[in-house]
Image (cartoon, rainbow, N blue to C red):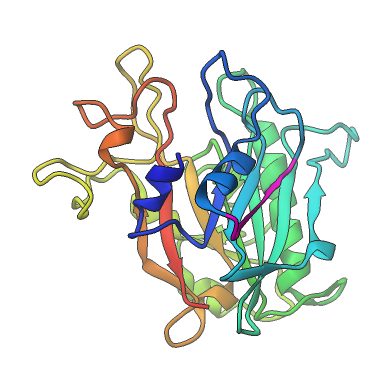
Amino acid sequence: MASILQGMSGGAPALMAFCEVACPKRVKNIDAAKAVAEALGPQYKHCTATEGDQRGITCAAVWNTSQLDENTAARRLHAVIDDVTGGEYGRPILELQLTASGSDRTFTLFVNHWTSRREENTEGRRTLAGAHLVRLTQRKVVKGGDFTGNPKALVLAVGDFNDEPYNPSLVDPSGRSSRPLVVRDRTAVLKRRPATLAPVLYNASWSLLGERQTRTEEIAAGREKPAGTYLFSEVGKGQWNTFDQVLVSAGMLEGDPPVFDDGSLAVYCPFELVNTDGVPEMTSDHFPIRFALNL
């Protein structure tokens, strides 16, 4: 895994988020983020949301400490709780606060891994997770009423959402907003008034949805990019989904150049991750996505 990450852009990224790392059955109770950080070198640090995760489905992050500094006091793990029943659903959301070395630019990272679709009647759990993520973001970026956030705050939410960009959990999870809370229109996010609750996040991942994209330099000439980020191909059939996404606040879209480089977002699928048909090997069925931040 470390060698694949190092090939993403001529070297390992400054920041990596993990939502699910499948391991052979013979490998038990491995902290994948810790293992990757150790393989990449002493300058890398990691944070894993929960310990003892034998299935490898917990949220985690790895970052280069020569490029990013963490405010450990701001580290949080947010349980997804139903306000009505009080029950806890799905995996917690990992929050980290990172600052670019030699810069005053600090951003909040939310790492998500929402409930799988394999079980029946799980849409409500993902919708709860979406509503929770939106509330966490509103506390950061809304200023007015009950909120004391900074409209220019830098918020980055990534993960395996197990839903498409157009599903309710990623558009209007509260179901009570007059406008969508997460949108594909960056201008709408930029024009939101400080005290307005919606929209608070721009979903850049629509560009990855359902289209064959031009191959990038790491893929052999003539082979096509996937029509999404995920394909469950264990039985040799299935359809592409775009479950792996990146959402950003208005602050990430400001500046010259903007902090979030919209045009850099792409699915990363080198030879090591695909079979001869260009689809993911085995049931490790998610491709990584990559993008650049100007910090």
| In this view, 149 is above or below 199 | below
* Dominant SS type (magenta): strand
Seen at 68% across and 58% down, the residue is 177
Seen in the picture, residue 61 relative to 185 is either above or below; the reply is above
Furthest-bottom residue in view?
256
Residue 3: quarter of image: top left
Image quadrant where one finds the N terminus: top left
Residue drawn at (41%, 71%) of the image: 261
- Name the residue at the front extreme: 42
Q: Position of residue 180 (x, y in %)?
A: 59, 58
Q: Nearer the viewer, residue 43 or 72?
A: 43
Q: Is residue 46 magenta?
A: yes
Q: Is residue 149 magenta?
A: no
Residue 151 can be seen in this image:
yes
Which residue is more in the foreground, 184 or 3?
Answer: 3
Q: Residue furthest left?
A: 222
Q: Is residue 216 above or below residue 123?
A: below
- Residue at x 61% of width, y 69% of height: 68
Instruction: Work out whether residue 180 can be spotted.
Output: no
Name the residue nearer the viewer: 33 or 84: 33
Q: Is residue 191 left or right of residue 268?
A: right
Residue 113: image location, x then y, percent: 62, 39
Magenta extent: 42-49
Residue 191 percent location from the top left of the image: 56, 80
Residue at 60% across, 56% down: 42
